[in-house]
Each structure stands twice: as structure tokens, then as C-alpha cells.
Image (cartoon, rainbow, N blue to C red):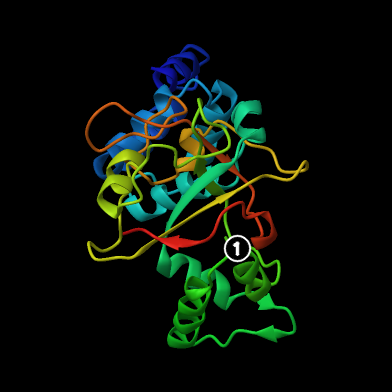
Amino acid sequence: MPFATILTRWRGQGRGQDSDRAEQALRTFEAKNAQVLLNLDEDRYVSQRLREELLQLLLGVAVNVADVVEGCVFNFCRAHQRLGKVNTTGQNAVLGHVVERGKTESTLRSVKLGKTPLTRKTGTTGLFVDRILRERDLVGQQSLLGNCDLSKWIMWSFYQARKLDDPFYKLPREKSELVRRLGLRLSKPDVELLLWQHKLEPHQTAHKPTALDAESFDYYRPGGKTRPLSGTDGLPEVVHQPVSSNQLAGMIEVAS
């Protein structure tokens, strides 16, 4: 247990009080985030240096207050993303992405499309997404989107190791199967899912995801593959910078 190893070393160095305080912070965090803590503890792509840095930060917060401890841990995660091993296969593959429609609408409300900024009314953005989905080809969708970013945060994508030009190869585009195979946790059961394909540009690097990328997502498991909700047919996954609509390699569609 890497965290325990650090705490044991601290005690051996005469830092017993620091060790006790950091251990209490971990217990506070574990009460609501047991799997997240286990991921941070066991992910071999999270270095001991970073774990010790996190423990050091926890010494400066109220170690018995769950919200304060969680805020410290998750802020630390967000500050140390895309640090996993570079995945050169994913870097050159066509990547697949599946996202809740509402998250895409939120992104589009914050960007300017050509010379016309979208209003911040959810309904207006929803109608705009409807219009995108009615387009019959990728060129039409890209024309409407005007080379805008499709996410505000780091993106999680997947690919097919045996079919690098088609991430959806033999993967049904049905919502239930996408949720199962990709290990998705939806905000609401009836949420609509959008899916697309894209390619990274040379300056964008695909990384093996780590527990730091996953933040509070307790469905994540270390290893570089999606974690199916059932079965063992996970797909290779990567994290990378946001892509723009000009990087699309396939139309934006709705999961059936």
C-alpha cells in the first residue's frame, strides 16, 4: 500500500504527528470515496512523489471535515492530469467518444460559432444540437460548428486495437451497450448520449489514464481499458486535450 509506505517512512523520520494527521485525512476521505482512494493507492502510474505531495497538502486542511478533505484531493487530481504514459497507438488511431448530450450543450453555450455566439438559454442550444443532428453528412455538421471545441475539459476516448480506423467496429451503437461496454455512469437514467469519432492533431498527446484523471469517478479502474459494467470486454482508452469539430472523423450521432 503506497500511502501506508509513505506514512511508515514519516514515522521512522520522527514525523509521527504528521503521519497521524495525514492518516486521519485519508480515513475521512475513504468514508465516502473508498474506491477512489483505492485507485489512488494502487495505480502504478501515480508516482510515490505525487502521493507524498498530496499527503503533504492534506496536512494543511481540516482533516476531519469531509468536504474540505475531498476538495483538497480533487483539486490535486485536476492539477495533475494527463501525466500517464503516452499511448502512441491511441495517438495515431481514430478515437471514439461518447458523452451525455447535456454536457455537449453546456460546452456549446460557452463557445462562439463563427461570428455568432450561442445564447445561454438551454432550449436554444438544444435546438442547435437538433439542427446538427439533422445534417446528412459530416461536412454539414462541421460547417455549423465552425471549428469550435467539443469539450471544456480533458476528454476520455477509446479505440479498437485491431481496427485502428474504426473505434465503433463491432460495437453496437445502442445506448445500453455503450453504457455497459464503456462503464459509463449517467447523471439520469433517461439521458441522451451523443457519439462521434475524431483524430488527434500532432500537438495533442494521448495518455494512458490514471486515477488522477478519473478524479471522483469511482467506476474507473487502473489498467488502461474501459471497465465494463458486466463482462470483461473492455476497450483501450486514453485521455487527451479537447478536440475541435474540425477533427471529427465521423458524424455526431445519437445512441439508439
**Looking at the image, which residue is at 70% across and 66% down?**
147
Looking at the image, residue 12 lies above or below residue 43: above
Residue 59 showing in the rendered view: no
Of 65 and 90, nearer the camera is 90
Q: Position of residue 168 (x, y in %)?
A: 44, 42
**Image quarter hosting the C terminus:** bottom left
Looking at the image, residue 224 lies above or below residue 153: above
**Looking at the image, which residue is at 36% across and 58% down?**
255
Which residue in the structure is indicated by mark 1?
Answer: 138
The amino acid on which the numbered mark 1 sits, given as a three-letter code, is: Leu
Q: Position of residue 116 (x, y in %)?
A: 69, 86
Residue 70 showing in the rendered view: yes
Q: Residue furthest right?
A: 203
Secondary element under disc 1, as helix, strand or loop, is: helix
**Looking at the image, which residue is at 37% across and 40% down?**
171
Q: Residue furthest front?
A: 136
Count of all numbered marks drawn on residues in the image? 1
The image quarter containing residue 38 is top left
The image quarter containing residue 40 is top left
Q: Is residue 85 left or right of residue 161?
A: right
| Crowd band around label 1 with a 10 angstrom C-alpha radius: few (<14), some (14–19), many (20+) | some
Q: Position of residue 148 (x, y in %)?
A: 67, 67
Q: Is residue 78 left or right of residue 38?
A: right
**Looking at the image, which residue is at 41% across and 26% down?**
41
Looking at the image, residue 209 lies above or below residue 126: above
Q: Position of residue 164 (x, y in %)?
A: 57, 32
The image quarter containing residue 82 is top right
**Image quarter hosting the N terminus:** top left
Q: Is residue 168 left or right of residue 233?
A: right
Of 125 and 219, nearer the camera is 125
